[in-house]
Amino acid sequence: MNRVVFLLSLSVLINYIDRSNLSIAAPLVQEELHLSNTQLGTLLGAFFWAYALLQIPAGWLVDHFDVKWVFAGGFFLWSLATGVTGILHGFIALIVVRVILGVGESVTFPSMSKILSTYFTEARRGFPNAALMVGMSLGPALGILLGGTVIGRFGWRPFFLVLGLGALLWLLPWLAWMPRRELGRATRSSSSPVGIKSILKQRSAWGTCLGQFSINYYLYFLVTWLPSYLKRERGLSLNQIAVDGFLLFVMCAIASAIWGKLSDRWVNAGATATLVRKSALVGGSIGVGVFLMLVVVSHGASFLATLALTGICLGPAVSNSWAVTQTLAGPIAAGRWAGVQNFVGNFAGWIAPILTGFLVDRTGRFWWAFLITAIVAGVGAVSWQFIVGPIEPIDWQRIARRPVTAVASAANASLP
């Protein structure tokens, strides 16, 4: 399965380049289409409309059908949408293709949670999840570094065309290496399949949803608005933006990889999953909030240091949220739980870009946007610590038997 993990990590890298590429091109697109900051925020957030709404259906799909083909179909659709973006003109047309991009990418994390929960035990799950987050971090990093350079030299349209159509080559090794086994079979063969209602009855499910919303809020704030912030408020050139943005996200990638390896060793040494996962999520979220506020007030070398430290804290946080879900839900419900979690979490993708654009239009600065993002990070830390319970597999069979037992007891009690 190492080859499959590599392909999944590569697909996440492509995924995050594709969802962040518009933010890299945003200054040129805004100028070409004469958009206000609020309109630009709407365009940046359009991807998340379909992406969030389709998370629950996507979770159902990967629990009931062969995840190999579900994910391949989504990858094909989102790559095609990226390529088509390069030939479109007009605000509405760009919104439509960003929505289509969201439809394709909606299957990503339910599919990955299904695969990792099926093929990897708790003690081996830290590094594969971290590998996916390395791809997620390198996506914006390489997108900003290479995209800024390419767009600055050739314009934004060729960048989208080559990126989208070239990515389709990924499908060849995926179809060859991914096992043909139908992972959804485990759900259908169970005598007590887990529905959405069963998941929503778990307090920890609500905790992971709120925690994921927090992670997505500060992640998408950085992915969608960091280039514009660096250009407008810091006065950086496209090349400087590329380097500074690359620094933040590459530090996130390095921190994810290191923490993933250490977390597996920590669990194998006898530490509980609760201690390992919550330490990363709570500490990482608090660190992101603190260093984001320091980014706003720092200058020179200290500015670069706070960007790097933000990325270092981002790494452990983003690489552990899905490991929590995979452990709690198990193979039987990982797809649907991940779908519910990502559905709620990606409302942040609607709110963060639009709210940031609105605040910048009203105030002319990014200070309030950074403050709100830091507060949301703190709320996420509280959720991971106090709302999410012990990180242990849920006994879905016992939960399914509970109503039957209660009915039988009531019937026996009514006998003379």
Image: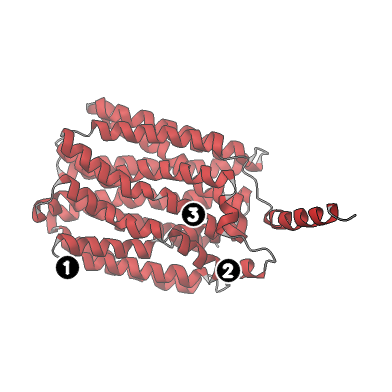
- The residue type indicated by label 1 comes to Ile
On-image quarter of the N terminus:
bottom right
Residue 10 percent location from the top left of the image:
40, 59
Q: Is residue 234 left or right of residue 128?
A: left
User: Which-is-in-front pick, marks 1 and 2?
Assistant: 2
Asked if residue 211 can be seen in this view, the reply is: yes
Label 2, on which residue?
184
Query: Disc 2 and disc 3: Cα gap in Å?
Result: 17 Å
User: Which-is-in-front pick, marks 1 and 3?
Assistant: 3
Label 1, on which residue?
87
In the image, residue 107 sits, relative to residue 251, either above or below, namely below
Mark toward the start of the polypeptide (1 vs 2) = 1
Regarding mark 3 in the picture, which secondary structure is present there?
A: helix
Q: Residue furthest right?
A: 416
User: Which-is-in-front pick, marks 2 and 3?
Assistant: 3
Residue 140 percent location from the top left of the image:
31, 50
The image's colouring method is secondary structure
Quadrant in the picture for residue 379? top left
